[in-house]
Image: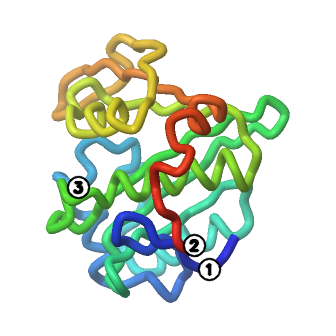
Amino acid sequence: MTNSVSILGYFIRPLTVSDVTDDYLKWFDDDEVLRFLEINKTKNDVSSLKDLINYVKRFEVSNDYLFGIFDNSKHIGNITINHIDNDRGTFDMGYLIGNKDYWGKRAGEAGLVFGLRFAFEDLGLRKIFGGIYSKNLTARFLSKKIGFVEEARLKEKGYVDGELDDVIIYTMTRKQWKHLYSGKYDFKF
């Protein structure tokens, strides 16, 4: 993979410790940013720049991938590709737009489409599974727009805003990806 890929006006590249800043750290202290994510300060203990550096370094020695989404040189979000099962060809993916100025501006779409292309084409994986809380209407809408299929609903799987919520499992196969995205997005390497 090349260092940086451009899609929908955003640049996506592997995140490094040099990208760890106070602005990035603030994302982990913003309840609105973290509302629908499994990560939180208690579970990941990301409360200092050192913690965040360790979080980023963890991806350097694992089978998981962490990419940053950038508007020019401004770090605005992340994409993770994880829980890769090479034997079955499956993976999970998550995204976070930590800079709220970019909510609703296609940064999440750019990140997800990049992540799918990377996992299906570069890694040769065959199917993604992604869980989204039912109350996360924005992520559900974006997943359907991109072409994910609702495959399952796990009743009362987790908590959102202190209340039990269902997790909806969305999937897409490499075959679906190729059918949907052959030439649709202009990736600049």
Q: Residue at x 26, y 21 (%)?
A: 165
Q: Is residue 177 left or right of residue 89?
A: left
Asked which secondary structure carries label 1, the reply is loop
**Pointer 3 or 2: first along the chain:** 2
Residue 71 vertical position relative to residue 30 in the rendered view, above or below: below
- Counting residues from the start of the chain, the first of labels 3 and 1 encountered is 1
Q: Which mark is residue 14?
A: 2
Amino acid type, callout 2:
Pro
Report the mark closest to the observer, 3 or 1: 1
* Quadrant in the picture for the N terminus: bottom right
Secondary element under disc 2, as helix, strand or loop, is strand
Q: Looking at the image, which is closer to me, 163 or 155?
A: 155
Dots 3, 2 in contact, CB < 8 A: no
What numbered label is drawn on residue 33? 3
Relative to 63, say whether 71 is above or below.
below
- Residue 78, position in %: x, y? 42, 63
Other residues around mark 2 within 10 Å, as few (<14) / some (14–19) / many (≥20) = many
**Closer-to-camera residue (186/93):** 186
> Closer to the N terminus: mark 2 or mark 1?
1
Crowding near the residue tagged with mark 1, few <14, some 14–19, many ≥20 C-alpha atoms within 10 Å: few
Dividing the picture into quarters, in which one does residue 161 lie?
top left
Total marks placed? 3
Residue sitting nearer the eye, 12 or 166: 12
Question: Is residue 33 rendered to the left or right of residue 37?
Answer: left
> What distance separates the C-alpha of mark 3 from that of mark 2?
21 Å
Residue at 46% in and 49% down: 184
**Structural distance between the alpha carbons of marks 2 and 1:** 7 Å
Q: Residue at 80%, 40% (x, y): give it.
A: 86
Where does residue 106 sit, x and y in percent of width and height? 27, 57
The foreground one among 126 and 157 is 126
| Disc 3 residue type (three-letter) | Val
